[in-house]
Image (cartoon, rainbow, N blue to C red):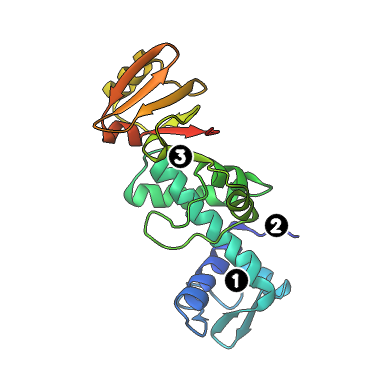
Amino acid sequence: MEKLTPHAEEILESLWIATVEEKAVGCLLSDLDLGPNDEALSELVRLAYVEKRGDRLSLRKEGRPEAEMTVRRHRLAERLMMDILNIQGEKGNDQACEFEHLLHEGVDTKICTLLNHPTTCPHGKPIPPGTCCEEARSKGDFGVVPLTEMKAGQAGEIAYLAISDGQKMQKLMSMGVLPGNQLELVQRFPSYVLKVGNSQFAVDDTLAREIHIRDLR
């Protein structure tokens, strides 16, 4: 399949949202800030992904799979920026718009698995599922989950720490809570008691949510 230019992907993304999610018939070229001779538009017409009639643009069935995956990549990028890298607000959206165009050749699958196959973006909009999501559900694969989703007695490898507070990070590092180390959840209530190596520590709910675990067993 031919790799689209970033601008062409953005057009498909806008058309998918307008026609599939918002149930519009199509989009006016002016709504997409497109001229009749736009190069990205010509690219999509040549591939038969879109149809242009006068000043209106519609998404063809041939373009729907790529449009859906473009939306998926963008919303996964939003999750990555805001949940993992803690880049919030407009800056997070801008970074996601740039990063989404890099999520090709299986990179989107790796990001999706890292994020534990999320179903919605940070704004609550659905993330179209990929084959990795279907396979994970069928195998009962938990992917990467926050400590708060573990059951007492479960253990796994620390995947990452979603913490921006330097003092909290130092506290966890002093406990040996570092990516790659093994962790066992001893109890959940009244506080989360975790075991790393031969040591046990108690953390509150807020801190527990920022510790992410993979390979539960």
* Residue 167 visible: yes
Residue appearing at x 54%, y 75% in the figure: 35
Pick whichever, 179 or 40, lies toward us: 179
Residue at the far top: name it.
Answer: 198
Q: Position of residue 148 (x, y in %)?
A: 36, 38
Which residue has dot 3 on it? 145
Q: Which residue is mark 1?
A: 38
What is the three-letter code of the residue carrying label 2? Lys
The mark lying in front, picked from 3 and 2, is: 3
Q: Could you say which disc has been placed on residue 3 in the image?
A: 2
**Spatial separation of the CA atoms under disc 3 and disc 2:** 32 Å
Task: Provide the secondary structure element on which disc 2 rests.
Answer: loop
* Image position of 195 (left or right of 72): left
Secondary structure beneath label 1: loop
Residue 39 in view: no
The answer for how far apart the CA atoms under marks 2 and 1 are is 18 Å
| Residues tagged 2 and 1 counted as in contact (Cβ below 8 A) | no
Earlier-in-chain disc, 1 versus 3: 1
* Residue 100, image x, y percentages: 54, 51
When asked about the image quadrant of residue 50, the answer is: bottom right
